[in-house]
Amino acid sequence: EARGRGAGEALVRACVDRARAVPGCTGVVLSTQSAMRTAHRLYERLGFVRTPDRDWNPLPELDDIMLLAYARTL
């Protein structure tokens, strides 16, 4: 079990660092499930902002599945 050990934060930071290393990359967008409230707080603490205009449904035939988008400018 990785909860509470900083694994999620380390992974998000690694993604941001990798994006920064890409010439011309100006930001990062991630998607998450609405029930993952602890993760949402982590993303916000790391500088991500909710971007509802980028929310999407990976399974359009199922109306109740919506992934929430968060974005961070680099």
Image (cartoon, rainbow, N blue to C red):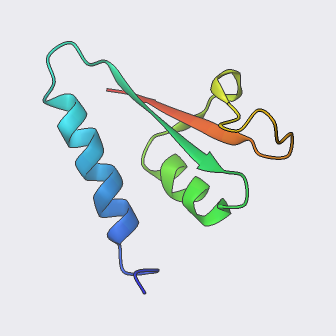
Q: Is residue 69 left or right of residue 64?
A: left
Q: Quadrant of residue 59?
A: top right
Q: Is residue 2 left or right of residue 15?
A: right
Residue at (76% x, 32% y) in the render:
60
Q: What is the residue that sits farthest to the top in this orientation? A: 24
Residue at (65% x, 61% y) in the render:
36
Q: Position of residue 56 (x, y in %)?
A: 68, 31
Q: Position of residue 31 (x, y in %)?
A: 55, 41
Q: Position of residue 2 (x, y in %)?
A: 40, 81
Question: Quadrant of the image for the N terminus?
Answer: bottom left
Q: Is residue 10 above or below residue 14?
A: below
Q: What is the residue that sits farthest to the bottom in this orientation? A: 1
Total marks in image: 0
Question: Quadrant of the image for the C terminus?
Answer: top left
Residue at (16% x, 24% y) in the render:
22
Q: Position of residue 25 (x, y in %)?
A: 26, 19
Q: Is residue 11 left or right of residue 29?
A: left
